[in-house]
Image (spheres, rainbow, N blue to C red):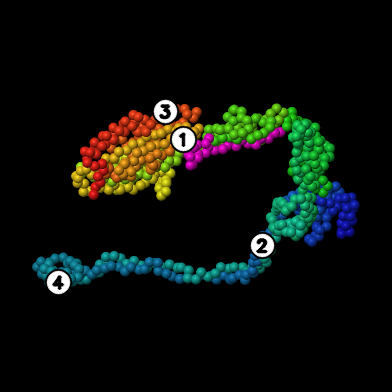
């Protein structure tokens, strides 16, 4: 037999049928089908019928129903399908032999079912009356009836005795019961030996590595994926039946080759010249796969193709199995007019800016880049390259390519100009001051007061009460002055002043006057005067205008002059052309300015031609004005009269 099998194998190899990559293995016993000889356990011999390659298939030679074995492999998995097997026998435990036992009759005994109950009786005695002259019939009475204590029994004597039954006696009831059951007869047995379990078993290995080793009843179906479908794998399936028949299946798998999809590129335009470039089909490089374009072999790479429909197909190369899609309909598109691509940088927004130190608001803007062959529109209006101011918010930028060009990039997009928020002008409040109470000329008390800065851009409160004028009467004691910027402004502190939550706070004290006795005259009446001089031409150049003040003759330091917070310390102070408010204040709060103490003066600029006369604004005394001199003389005359009346111009308190 071995020689016959070897000869058959050699013949089939010569015909190219043995040793190939068989992918499907089937074993059946059926009329007209190839019959496969049973392989003895441990044998790997294969019998192959002409035209059908079967590797390692075997079938038992018995006449019983034969199983159907289908073992096949693809490039990606091995499938084992076994059916029609006879189920094995379950294990049976051994049964030991027994000696049996003889018959033993049971024994019985008597037991009382109901015990006997004795009769219930009592004794009666017959009495006969003793008096013969009054005979009576005898009477039966219970024992004790004839007693001395019973008057009715007098004269009666006992003549007889009897027993009377109240309840008759009940006899005892008994029964026979088994005392010893004995034992039944049991015949001896010979016993049976143990029976071992039998079953069908399948073992699967791939590349020499076990994948399954399991029992099965009548059928088994399982698929084993290959770890790497792109490589060939050797495999073995061995089936041992419940009656120890063996089926063996061996075979290699072929590696998978999965085609990659080819692509079609339409005809296009040269990005530099605008000329038409023909379309093409790109064939990928895939191991184990051959491609055709319209049934013409095509290797990897780009292949020129006319615009229109094309079909690309894939075939497995020698030694590979094709897996996946293998045919693709592709269309190579045509191109229309070619345009030269042009690209433009994006327009960029710049936010609105608030100058912190100045409070000046600078508008936001959009910068359009310089670009050829494109047109920019913002909110539908065309703008040239450069910066263009716009309001805060979103704006739509539209970019259009010129004739013969095509735009690359966004043709429309939004830009946003962020607002600066509230832009506030900085303002520095004037420091408030407190003036104490003072004694007047007649022994009375003048009110103390608090002076604040200008109210134009700053609001003040004194002890929470809004301030309406620069000078506010204040009672003696502690006071709190708070400055707050008006709308559109923000406070800026000076020195140690700190802005907290938009406020600057000063604690001030107004002292109370005391010991104000009348001792006239105790105050001085001080004269004060201020005037303005315009710019003039002097030798072809401009001489500055100035503000002139007159200090008190007896005590030049008695009167102070101010323009705003600026003190005038000289009789003439050069100033720029403009309008000024000059205020005279007595240095000693007990003194008083006699007459006007505030003047609004204007210093005019020189004309455009040197020597041109300009109008001189005059308020107060000007040395070049005769009327002013006369008025000054009148004031001095009146002042002299007042001095004469008071006997002195200035008298201080001792």
* Residue matched to label 2: 91
Q: Nearer the viewer, mark 1 or mark 2?
A: 1
Pointer 4 local density, CA inside 10 Å: few below 14, some 14–19, many at least 20: few
* 3D distance between C-alphas at marks 1 and 4: 183 Å
Q: Residue 308, how many percent across, how many down?
A: 77, 31
CB within 8 Å, label 1 to label 3: no
Q: Residues within 10 Å of mark 3 (few under 14, many from 20)?
A: few
Quick one: label 2, few (<14), some, or many (20+) residues within 10 Å? few
| Disc 1 to disc 3, C-alpha distance | 16 Å
In the picture shown, does residue 509 fall above or below 611?
below
Q: Which mark is residue 147?
A: 4
Does residue 164 appear anywhere in the picture? yes
Disc with the residue nearer the chain's start (3 vs 4): 4
Report which residue position mark 3 lands on: 615
In the drawing, does residue 559 fall left or right of residue 33? left
* Disc nearest the viewer among 1 and 3: 1
Q: Tell me how many marks there are.
A: 4
- Horizontal and vertical percent for residue 66? 76, 52
Report the span colored magenta. Answer: 341-363
In which quadrant of the rendered view does residue 386 lie? top right
């Amino acid at each position: 037999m071995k020689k016959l099998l070897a000869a058959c194998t050699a013949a089939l190899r010569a015909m190219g049928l043995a040793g190939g990559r068989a992918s499907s293995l089937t074993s059946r016993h059926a009329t007209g089908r190839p019959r496969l000889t049973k392989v003895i356990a441990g044998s790997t011999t294969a019998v192959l019928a002409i035209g059908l390659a079967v590797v390692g298939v075997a079938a038992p030679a018995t006449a019983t129903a034969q199983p159907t074995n289908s073992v096949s492999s693809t490039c990606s998995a091995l499938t084992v399908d076994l059916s029609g097997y006879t189920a094995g026998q379950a294990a049976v435990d051994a049964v030991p032999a027994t000696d049996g036992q003889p018959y033993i009759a049971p024994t019985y005994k008597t037991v009382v079912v109901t015990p006997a109950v004795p009769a219930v009786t009592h004794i009666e005695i017959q009495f006969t009356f003793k008096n013969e002259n009054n005979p009576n019939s005898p009477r039966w009475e219970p024992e004790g009836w004839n007693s001395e204590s019973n008057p009715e029994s007098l004269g009666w004597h006992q003549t007889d005795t009897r027993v009377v039954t109240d309840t008759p006696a009940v006899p005892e009831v008994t029964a026979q019961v088994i005392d010893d059951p004995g034992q039944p007869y049991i015949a001896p047995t010979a016993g049976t030996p143990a029976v071992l379990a039998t079953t069908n078993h399948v073992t699967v290995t791939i590349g020499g590595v076990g994948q399954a080793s399991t029992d099965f009843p009548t059928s088994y179906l399982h698929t084993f994926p290959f770890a790497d479908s792109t490589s060939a794998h050797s495999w073995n399936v061995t089936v041992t039946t419940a009656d120890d028949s063996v089926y063996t299946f061996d075979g290699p798998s072929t590696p998978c080759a999965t085609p990659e999809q080819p692509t079609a590129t339409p005809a296009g335009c040269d990005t530099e010249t605008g000329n038409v470039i023909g379309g093409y089909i790109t064939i990928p490089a895939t191991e184990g796969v051959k491609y055709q374009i319209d049934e013409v072999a095509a290797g990897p790479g780009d292949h020129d193709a006319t615009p229109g429909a094309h079909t690309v197909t894939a075939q497995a190369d020698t030694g590979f199995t094709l897996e996946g899609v293998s045919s693709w309909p592709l269309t190579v598109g045509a191109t229309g007019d070619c345009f030269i691509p042009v690209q433009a940088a994006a327009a960029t927004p710049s936010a609105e800016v608030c100058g912190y130190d100045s409070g000046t608001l600078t508008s936001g803007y959009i910068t359009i880049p310089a670009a050829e062959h494109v047109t920019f529109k913002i909110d539908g209006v065309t703008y040239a390259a450069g910066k263009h101011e716009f309001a805060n918010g979103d704006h739509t930028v539209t970019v259009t390519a010129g004739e013969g060009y095509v735009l690359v990039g966004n043709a429309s997009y939004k830009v946003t100009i962020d607002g600066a928020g509230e832009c506030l002008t900085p303002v520095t409040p004037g420091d408030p001051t407190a003036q104490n109470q003072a004694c007047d000329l007649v022994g009375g008390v003048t009110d103390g007061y608090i002076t604040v800065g200008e109210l134009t851009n700053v609001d003040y409160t004194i002890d929470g009460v809004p301030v309406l004028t620069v000078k506010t009467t204040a009672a003696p004691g502690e006071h709190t002055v708070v400055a707050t910027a008006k709308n559109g402004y923000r406070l800026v502190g000076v020195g140690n002043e700190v802005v907290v939550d938009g406020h600057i706070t000063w604690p001030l004290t107004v002292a109370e006057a005391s010991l104000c006795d009348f001792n006239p005259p105790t105050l001085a009446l001080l004269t004060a005067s201020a005037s303005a001089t315009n710019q003039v031409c002097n030798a072809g150049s401009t001489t500055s205008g100035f503000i002139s003040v007159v200090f008190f003759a007896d005590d030049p330091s008695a009167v102070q002059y101010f323009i705003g917070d600026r003190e005038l310390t000289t009789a003439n102070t050069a100033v720029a052309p403009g309008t000024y408010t000059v205020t005279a204040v007595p240095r000693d709060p007990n003194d008083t300015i006699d007459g006007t103490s505030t003047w609004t003066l204007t210093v005019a600029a020189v004309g455009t031609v040197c020597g041109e006369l300009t109008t001189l604004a005059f308020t107060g005394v000007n040395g070049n004005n005769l009327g002013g001199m006369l008025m000054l003389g009148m004031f001095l005359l009146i002042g002299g009269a007042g001095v004469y009346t008071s006997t002195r111009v200035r008298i201080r308190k001792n």
